[in-house]
Image (cartoon, rainbow, N blue to C red):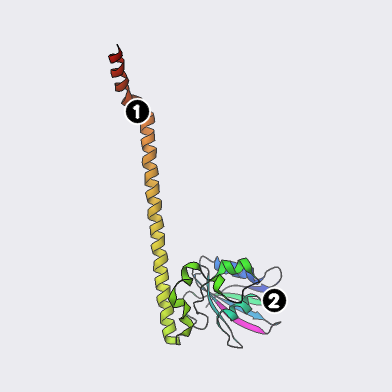
Amino acid sequence: MDIIIEGVITKEEGMNEVVETIIHLKSVPSALLRVSCKEASLQGRVGFGPGGYILGGCIDDTGETGYAAVKKLLTVKSGNYAVLDMTNEYVPEINQTLWLKGDKVVEIWPNLPDSPDSLLGASLSSIPALQNINQLNPEDREDAINRIRRNYSRSKAHEAQITKYHLALKLSWLLITLILVMVVVKYGYILVSPFFVTRHSLIK
């Protein structure tokens, strides 16, 4: 995996800014954030997926995973970080399908809640498979993760197509309306003049 960004965690550049940078990386849909904090004797990784979602994390020394690991790593106050391109890689220890919305994490940072429920994406938290994903054995979990990703990608693509269709329909009706208005403005007198001529003749 190639390092695309690296830097130092300080008061001026906190983890909130690092997270915000990662979720807005258009050219890197899947990224791995590597964090090292000597002060807290902490080293670990956080995985980011397409759409600004945080998939999971792990602490290397203790083996701690899931939201607890993500919370610790994203609230460190000093240390070093590196962002790696994970587009063509699969790292099972951080691909835990937490589906935390990165922008929600940034909004409330550093006061991350004890439970990840309020950080879940609304469209993903309702998927039953996500609620039981961590109870599966590693082989079944990987299959479930891949299936959820495919279904979610198809769902988002379908939503985009529907949005484009509705937009095209609205533009078509707007164009038709404008054409009718132009016709009435330009040729309205010609269309109604026979009526006025006939009425004038009857009055005479």
**Whole-percent x and y of residue 33?**
58, 76
Residue at the spot x=30%, y=18% of the render?
Answer: 199
Seen from the viewer's position, the closer of residues 93 and 193 is 193
Q: Residue furthest top?
A: 204
Pick whichever of labels 1 and 2 is earlier in the sequence: 2
Q: Residue tagged by mark 1?
A: 187
Query: Which mark identifies residue 78?
Result: 2
Residue at the spot x=56%, y=77% of the render?
Answer: 46
Which residue type carries mark 2?
Ser
Foreground mark, 1 or 2, reads 1
Instruction: Work out whether 41 lies above or below 173.
Output: below
> Residue 61 vs residue 148: left or right?
right
Specify whether residue 93 is painted magenta.
Answer: no
> Residue 59 vs residue 154: left or right?
right
Place residue 9 in its image quadrant. bottom right
**Any part of residue 89 in sight:** no
Q: CA distance from mark 1 to mark 2?
A: 73 Å
Please provide the residue range marked out in magenta. 40-46
Instruction: Work out whether 26 lies above or below 66.
Output: above
Query: Which secondary structure, mark 1?
Result: helix
Which residue type carries mark 1?
Tyr
**Whole-percent x and y of residue 177?**
38, 39
